[in-house]
Amino acid sequence: MTLTYQYGRALVWMDDLVEEVDPHGYDLCDRHGERLTVPTGWRLEDRRNRFRVIVPNRLAG
């Protein structure tokens, strides 16, 4: 997952892993992302897609 934030609004976003580079973005493993807490007075918005469809790129056979 990717964590981004906006300091002036005291806001943190959790998104699915993104490819774009953002100076305020940090990639986290699932373990650390699930344990994340934000400072008092900050708001956390979890925008991750919880239901991912996995499509194999090749069919067996």
Image: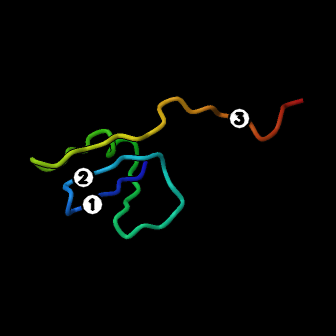
Residue 37 on image: x %, y %: 20, 44
Q: Is residue 26 left or right of residue 44?
A: right
Q: Is residue 43 left or right of residue 60?
A: left
For the residues marked 3 and 2, what is the alpha-carbon distance in whole angstroms? 33 Å
Q: Earlier in the sequence, mark 1 or mark 2?
A: 1
For the residues marked 1 and 2, what is the alpha-carbon distance in whole angstroms? 5 Å
Residue under label 1? 6
Q: Is residue 18 left or right of residue 29?
A: right
Q: Residue at x 32, y 46 (%)?
A: 32
Q: Residues within 10 Å of mark 2 (few under 14, many from 20)?
A: some
For the residues marked 3 and 1, what is the alpha-carbon distance in whole angstroms? 34 Å
| Residue in the foreground of this view, choosing between 31 and 49 | 49
Q: Earlier in the sequence, mark 3 or mark 1?
A: 1
Q: Earlier in the sequence, mark 3 or mark 2?
A: 2
Q: Residues within 10 Å of mark 1 (few under 14, many from 20)?
A: few
Mark in front: 3 vs 1: 1
Q: Amino acid at mark 2?
A: Leu
Q: Residue at x 16, y 49 (%)?
A: 42
Q: Are marks 1 and 2 in contact (CB under 8 Å)?
A: yes
Colour approach in the figure: rainbow
Residue under label 2? 11
Residue under label 3? 55
| Residue in the foreground of this view, choosing between 57 and 53 | 53
Q: What element does badge 2 sit on?
A: strand
Vertical placement of residue 6 versus 46, above or below: below
Q: Are marks 3 and 1 in contact (CB under 8 Å)?
A: no
